[in-house]
Amino acid sequence: MRRDEVSTVHAGGGATTRSGRPLPRPNEGVWPGLATAPHSPWRAWIAEQLFRRAVRTLPLRVELPGGVRLGAGGPDSPLMRVHRPGAFFHRLGVDAKIGFGESYMVGDWTSSAIADLLSVFAARLTTLVPPRLQALRRWVERPQPSSERNTVAGARENIHRHYDLSNDLFATFLDETMSYSSALFEAGSTDLVAGQLRKIDGVLDYAGVRADSHVLEIGTGWGGLAIRAAQRGARVTSLTISPEQKRLAEQRIAEAGVADRVQVLLRDYREAQGQYDAVVSVEMIEAVGAEYWPTYFGTLDRLLKPGGRVGLQAITMPHDRLLATRDSYGWVHKYVFPGGLIPSVRAIEQNVRFHTGLRVAESRSFGGDYAETLRQWRERFVDRWEQVAELGFDDTFRRMWEFYLAYSEAGFRVGYLDVRQFALAGRP
């Protein structure tokens, strides 16, 4: 690993939380602490024994220096090459949830079929660690930092760290609709643009959006849904807390010729006022946090006119996994989505039941479509890396983003993650 690939915090650069904890700043090439692997011989030894035990029966291949081979996979199974086992096992031993991804970021291990490899691990995720050691998780796992709570100010900082990386970055791998959420493909089709429009239409239909509707959108993205709703003849008020997204969304809305029907506000959902015929929110709940789920759903209810409907799209995980991991801090939190938490279907239904006058009228899941969406994003990102590099992103970012997209794809491939649209009906 070249030293220039993994830099530290710029002097006075502000890459810290309010409490002074150094933060990664991927768009600035800031990777605090990443260049040096942690040192904990006892934990590293335990991590190596657990890793060897875990991969022994998995349908993959692991190659270590000196010709050591692990795993039960055949010649066509995904291959993981561990180049620096010492650093790899020390990172795993100190914090497995973060260290596995960090070791890929710095090149301790590589794979030419990373999504296939991670899918094998994801399929056995709940059994990789023996049950007796899983019981010790709450004593050794790092909790989510209080500085990343999704208060109004905290949510803005958390969103800034992801969505304000660069509009041009997202444009390199998203399709022309600039939709950063799962497509909903027609049977037999993998056309990403058609799938994204079908997804948007599905959410708008669930919310009952018509030509005379006044729609509130919570989470603007880059304007794709607002444009589609306005093309139906609806008026749209769209909320975002990302200045970068607001700027590009307004540009795209104007270019689509619907600026007279869409207003984009830099405003937190908790600060929204008024009453709307329909409320839509696509994959924004994952950034809310369990602490604020009652507030989020209560806000949907408060802003909806009697007889109105909500169209909601959410990534979900099994409820038992939510309960087991809701307070832990992992690689995705540190590098991609600070403050994020994926809900379960049960958690959504319970919050609707206990904190609103709404009810779930319809729902549909399409997790397999998200796996395909992520596969296409990942391939576009890799194929267009030279364009991304010209924006100033370094090789550490390339490996981080590829790992993030492949890691997510694997979760949807094996059913550990799902995505679902909900139609919430309001009071008559």
Image (cartoon, rainbow, N blue to C red):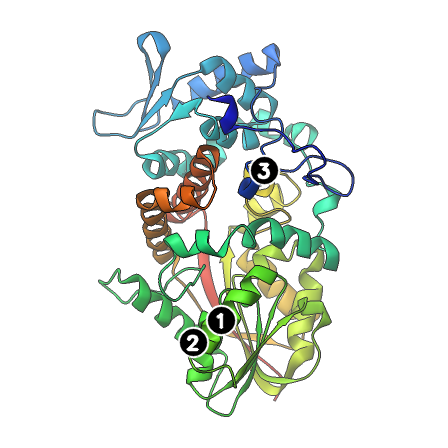
Q: Secondary structure at mark 3?
A: loop
Name the amino acid type tagged 2.
Glu
Image mark for residue 255: 2
Rendered residue at 49%/28% (across/down): 5
Earlier in the chain: of badge 3 and badge 1, it is 1
Residue 212 vs 422, above or below: the answer is below
Measured in 3D between alpha carbons, the distance from the residue under mark 1 to the one under mark 2, in whole angstroms, is 6 Å
Earlier in the chain: of badge 2 and badge 3, it is 2
Work out whether residue 127 or residue 70 is closer to the camera in this orientation and state it: 70
Residue 8 vs 149, above or below: the answer is above
Rendered residue at 52%/72% (across/down): 250
From the image, tell me which residue sits under label 1: 251
From the image, tell me which residue sits under label 3: 330
Could you tell me residue 168's position as x and y percent? 45, 55
Question: Mark 2, residues whose alpha carbon is within 10 Å: few (<14), some, or many (≥20)?
Answer: few
Work out whether residue 192 or residue 365 is closer to the camera in this orientation and state it: 192
Q: Secondary structure at mark 1?
A: helix
Name the amino acid type tagged 3.
Gly
Name the amino acid type tagged 1.
Gln
Determine if residue 380 is in view.
yes
Q: Based on the displayed image, in which of its 4 quarters is residue 267 positioned?
A: bottom right
